[in-house]
Amino acid sequence: MTAERQIPRVLSIAGSDSGGGAGIQADLKAFAASGVHGMTAVTAITAQNTVGVDLVEAVSPAMIIAQIKAVSDDIGVDAVKIGMLGDRSTIEAVDAGLNLLGEVPIVLDPVMVSESGATLLAPEARETLVELILPRASVATPNIPEAKVIAGLDEAEGGAGAADDPGQTVLARAIVGLGLNAVVVTGGHSDGYVDLFFDGEQEVAITGEVHPGRSAHGSGCTHSSALAAGLALGLEPLEAARKARDLASLAVAGSLDQIGAGPGPVNALGL
């Protein structure tokens, strides 16, 4: 009798998007598309749709820790994706919850602003994120504006060009210099849509199909979740980042622009 195959288990610690486009809803779709079992610890509930975010309500720190513990105690966790954290108390709760998981790969998507422009991480909490969560991450996946905040670089120093521009290189090196193992500075805000991977030794530009006319709502969540899934499946960070870019590009190509009056959700499942 052959042993039953163990499906990798990936935990998303992130906020809920009631419109189904980003947050844990996008994460679960990306996990399914990547062939892993997805679980969640919800950090915040948002009332949002394709047009904007109407209200955000934080989940209590005790409840965040309880969700992580419940999943860990019974199911187990092979990798973690961290998304929206919101405020300092939430970050501290997640930091405590991660202590329950042991040594597992962690992908940090430092969500700061929604696609519609709503603030999703309190400015006063950014330093706490860098101090407590960033050093625990195996890979961080900031976009260029988020990378500038994390690195403490202004517009002139950080730049905003493609991967062959000093902008993303400077940002990636500055972030790894904060004690991180690896970073992917995603290129959605650059001219070339090129992601830059850097792990302290390798600096690799990751390219893929570009679909500038399609909605990208949820693409960052999809990318980071697929990367976490890749790590859970045993891939090295660079290969996981390449596969994550492929899935994110595919999801944008099939984005459901007919849903809602604003930018529709990306489509990781090929609906």
Image (cartoon, grey):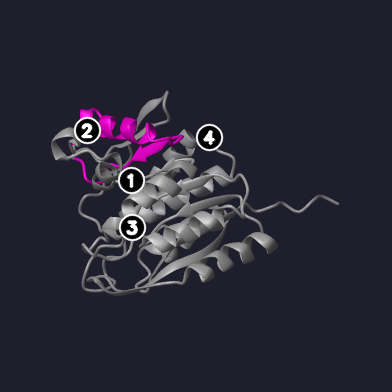
Q: Are marks 1 and 3 in contact (CB under 8 Å)?
A: no
Q: Which is nearer the N-term, disc 1 or disc 2? A: 1
For the C terminus, the image quarter is bottom left
Q: CA distance from mark 1 to mark 3?
A: 23 Å
Amino acid residing under circle 1: Pro
Task: Give me the residue at 46% from left, 52% from top.
Answer: 225
Report helix, strand or loop for mark 3: loop
Q: Which image quarter: residue 160?
A: top left
Amino acid residing under circle 3: Gly
* Foreground label between 2 and 4: 2
Q: CA distance from mark 3 to mark 2?
A: 30 Å
Residue position for label 3: 254
Depth check, front residue: 181 or 263: 181
Residue position for label 4: 236
Q: Mark 3, residues whose alpha carbon is within 10 Å: few (<14), some, or many (≥20)?
A: some
Amino acid residing under circle 2: Gly
Tell me if residue 129 is in the magenta stretch: no
Q: Mark 1, residues whose alpha carbon is within 10 Å: few (<14), some, or many (≥20)?
A: many
Q: Which is nearer the N-term, disc 4 or disc 3? A: 4
Residue 142 numbered mark, or none: 1
Q: Position of residue 55 (x, y in %)?
A: 29, 76
Q: Which is nearer the N-term, disc 1 or disc 3? A: 1
Q: Mark 4, residues whose alpha carbon is within 10 Å: few (<14), some, or many (≥20)?
A: few
Residue position for label 2: 167
